[in-house]
Image (tube, grey):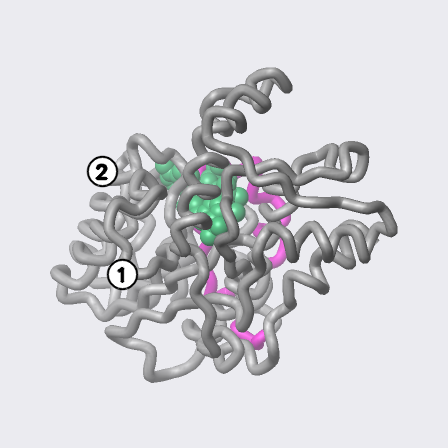
């Protein structure tokens, strides 16, 4: 039995669909959800629904009974994720799960003082807990979701003709979320992935000037990149009423980009999904074209 956590989320839902597409019978898939109501479509597909919450250890122990492989989708409650993720690893160990596939995040190990340490810390701790658990594990070091790239460009990019960010001239490698989920389904349905860490990045990285150029080309509207200082960016976002939490996240990612933390490319994802991943240029063409 394969259990997918975060099954009512974007990534978990895609992973389940890819498992079904690969011929895994619905009766061999379990979805861990917080709300049964939200899981109606999964139930209709014949998937067993188990209710559990990363904050409730006993609910996880009940939910993981009889599970061989666990696709552990990282949570999104950033301040409380450490305890939640420890619960998941401990419950998997207690119930005898044989293989945990975990959605971590990509990184350049040589970069110290990561601007996105507040996101990375839980991933690194969870990777270590898995390594210490004795359970076979696969670490999916997922690139930035390309689906978020429009957020970096800003909702009004075609009106203002400007991408204003403190990202310097750094590049980022991004992948559409559905392809990252497809790679997870491939790993869950094939052999030889135990005790491995896979950096799942695109084959090329993009800078902000290149992104502006691609948006201009796709939309027919001239867009340019205006690098801002952190303070300038903060003031501009505040004047647009963007909540402080989001300003902080965008600033952190822009700084990480400027420091080269997101400029990681490779072929691992391509070999797992068996084709070249969707490129940033293709994505931009689809969104702005
Ligand atoms: P999402 O749509 O927000 O889904 C997150 C899932 O986690 C939801 O199903 C949510 O349940 C579940 N969840 C959250 N807290 C939980 C808890 N305490 N107990 C049990 N389940 C819990 O996010 P996504 O787009 O699928 O992405 C999956 C994960 O990747 C995120 O949670 C985050 O860790 C990470 N992420 C990565 C990137 C990237 O660029 N690589 C970007 C964004 C997020 P409900 O459906 O009940 O809310």
Location of mark 2 (residue)? 83
Side of 133 where 38 appears, left or right? right
Q: Which quarter of the picture shows residue 182?
A: bottom right
Element at label 1: loop
The answer as to whether callout 2 falls within 8 Å of ligand 1 is no
Give the magenta part as a residue range.
22-45
* Residue drawn at x 54%, y 59% as measured from the top left: 174
For residue 159, above or below residue 197: above
| Residue 42 magenta-highlighted | yes
Few, some or many residues within 10 Å of mark 1 (<14, 14–19, 20+): few
Q: Which quarter of the picture shows residue 1?
A: bottom left
Of pointers 1 and 2, the one earlier in the residue sequence: 2
Please state the horizontal and vertical placement of residue 253, each as a whole percent of the image: 45, 43
Side of 223 where 68 appears, left or right? left
Please state the horizontal and vertical placement of residue 270, each as a whole percent of the image: 53, 78
* Image quadrant occupied by the C terminus: bottom right
* Residue drawn at x 60%, y 50% as measured from the top left: 208
For residue 288, above or below residue 246: below
In front: label 1 or label 2: 1
* Residue drawn at x 71%, y 38% as measured from the top left: 162
Element at label 2: helix
Please state the horizontal and vertical placement of residue 236, each as a whole percent of the image: 59, 22
Q: Are marks 1 and 2 in contact (CB under 8 Å)?
A: no
Location of mark 1 (residue)? 109
Whether residue 16 is visible to the viewer of this picture, yes or no, is no
Q: CA distance from mark 1 to mark 2?
A: 24 Å
């Amino acid at each position: 039995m394969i259990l997918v956590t975060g099954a009512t989320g974007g990534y978990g839902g895609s992973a389940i669909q890819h498992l079904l597409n690969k011929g895994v019978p619905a009766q061999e898939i379990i979805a861990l959800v917080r709300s049964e109501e939200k899981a109606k479509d999964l139930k209709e597909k014949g998937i067993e629904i188990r209710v559990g919450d990363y904050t409730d250890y006993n609910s996880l122990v009940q939910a993981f009974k009889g599970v061989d492989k666990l696709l552990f989708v990282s949570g999104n409650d950033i301040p409380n994720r450490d305890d939640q993720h420890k619960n998941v690893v401990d419950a998997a160990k207690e119930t005898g799960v044989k293989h945990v596939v975990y959605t971590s995040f990509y990184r350049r190990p040589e970069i110290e003082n990561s601007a996105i340490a507040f996101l990375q810390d839980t991933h690194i701790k969870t990777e270590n807990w898995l390594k210490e658990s004795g359970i076979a594990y696969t670490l999916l070091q997922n690139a930035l979701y390309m689906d978020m790239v429009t957020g970096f460009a800003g909702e009004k990019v075609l009106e203002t003709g400007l991408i204003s960010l403190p990202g310097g001239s750094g590049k980022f490698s991004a992948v559409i979320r559905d392809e990252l989920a497809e790679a997870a389904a491939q790993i869950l349905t094939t052999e030889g992935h135990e005790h491995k860490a896979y950096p799942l990045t695109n084959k090329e990285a993009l800078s902000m000037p290149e992104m502006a150029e691609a948006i201009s080309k796709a939309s027919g509207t001239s867009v340019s990149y205006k690098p801002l200082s952190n303070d300038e960016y903060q003031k501009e976002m505040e004047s647009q009423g963007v909540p402080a939490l989001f300003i902080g996240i965008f600033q952190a990612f822009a700084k990480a980009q400027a420091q080269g933390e997101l400029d990681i490319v490779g072929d691992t994802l391509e070999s797992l999904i068996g084709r070249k991943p969707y490129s940033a240029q293709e994505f931009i063409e689809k969104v702005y074209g």
